[in-house]
Image: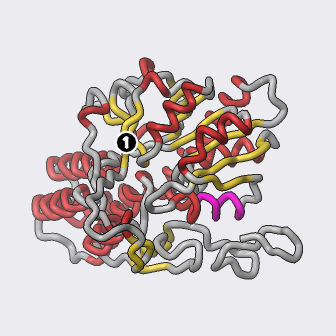
Amino acid sequence: MTSESDGEPSPPPGYHNGMATLQAIKYNDGSLEILDQLLLPESCTYISINNVQDAWSAIREMKVRGAPAIAIVGSLSLAVELRKLAAPETKKDLHSLVKEKLDYLVTSRPTAVNMQLAAEACVKLSNYLVDKASVDAAEAKDVLVKHLEAKLANDIADNLAIGEHGARDIAKKCVNKDKIRVLTHCNTGSLATAGYGTALGVILSLHKANLVDQVYCTETRPYNHGSRLTALELVYEKIPATLICDDMAAAAMKEFNIDAVIVGADRVAANGDTANKIGTYQLAVLAKSHNILLYVAAPFSSIDFQIPSGQSIPIEERPHSEMTHTGSIRTAAAGINCWNPGFDVTPAQLITGGIVTEKGVFKSDQLVPV
């Protein structure tokens, strides 16, 4: 991503005539496209999502990923289907269809709670419309479509607020530092959301305030979300950054005097335990050992108050081939057994900086439903 001739970062693939294509989700009047993140950073290629089945497959195959983006793409795929749907005969028929489709989308990836909560909210609204005598089936369909489509703009607004709250809190706690050094894990920027990002949004807000000295991003094995996606976003935003291997984190914390670790979350339990990309837990332990602040940045919708602790969060297991192969080339010994969880759980007591949401920064014992 850096030109050898002038040392300036070159634009990401797909950036032409001043118009950036570094956007995970494109939606306009029932037309939905997503950036195929399996092809990044070599190619910016958009694929059409024409129905719920397309969305389920794209989410499962990680062509789109990141808890907020999963919920948005899932919701918008249903909006696409409903827009094409002829007026249902009854509201109950519509409700059955909506519930069936949403239940199916929730099965695409089990750890992130955002899709589940989005489904529950839509089903609740559909139930309300069934009972409302003054609304006919066609009107009910329109209301549901508008509800599903609103998630895109709402997510961007939430991310901007997360960025501001997180940057302000970090700057306050690092008041003796002119510039701040942060470490982040996995990908939590525009590519994981509708735009701006969660943990990477906090970093972007710090950068805009001229407070970033250096960002260290892990490669995030085995899917390399950090080296393929976060590195791309950091270069695109012209944020000073350094890529490190996952096993360099402790050495980097000691060598570079890192001030804060900022990560995202796929689900936060009621007690503040947090599920995030595998490798987050070890970063939390290392941050605690080095007396470094650890922040978790996520929309309030990632908090699952129905789950008391991290022990109850379902952890997705990914295909072994993600570990044993690079593309189509085997890089591990044939016959070796593999363990490939997609996520791990960080205990609440290790989240020393706080949980950053669009509603503010909270300690784990301050989380209450709103």
Q: What count of labels does the image hold?
A: 1
Residue at the far top: name it.
Answer: 365
Q: Image quadrant of residue 19?
A: bottom right
- Label 1, secondary structure: give it: strand
In the rendered image, residue 232 lying in the magenta stretch gets the answer yes
Q: How crowded is mark 1: few (under 14 residues within 10 Å), some or many (20 or more)?
A: many
Answer above or below: position of 223 versus 173.
Answer: below
Answer above or below: position of 105 versus 286.
Answer: below
Q: Which residue is drawn at 75% across and 81% down?
A: 17
| Main secondary structure of the magenta stretch | helix
Q: Which residue is drawn at 42% across and 71% down?
A: 331
Name the quadrant of the N terminus. Answer: bottom right
Q: Which residue is drawn at 73% across and 38% down?
A: 256
Residue 288 image offset from top left, x and y in percent: 55, 26
- Left or right: residue 277 versus residue 138 is right
Given residues 161 and 63, the one toward you in this image is 63
Answer above or below: position of 6 versus 193.
Answer: below
Residue 149 image offset from top left, x and y in percent: 41, 61
- Left or right: residue 92 versus residue 276 is left
Residue 17, can we see it? yes
Residue 156, can we see it? no
Given residues 336 and 100, the one toward you in this image is 336
Task: Identify the amino acid type marked 1.
Answer: Asp
| Residue of label 1 | 344
Residue 189 image offset from top left, x and y in percent: 57, 54
- Left or right: residue 152 versus residue 23 is left
Given residues 72 and 259, the one toward you in this image is 259
Residue 143 image offset from top left, x and y in percent: 32, 58
Read off the magenta span: 230-235
In the rendered image, residue 334 lying in the magenta stretch gets the answer no
Q: Image quadrant of residue 94?
A: bottom left
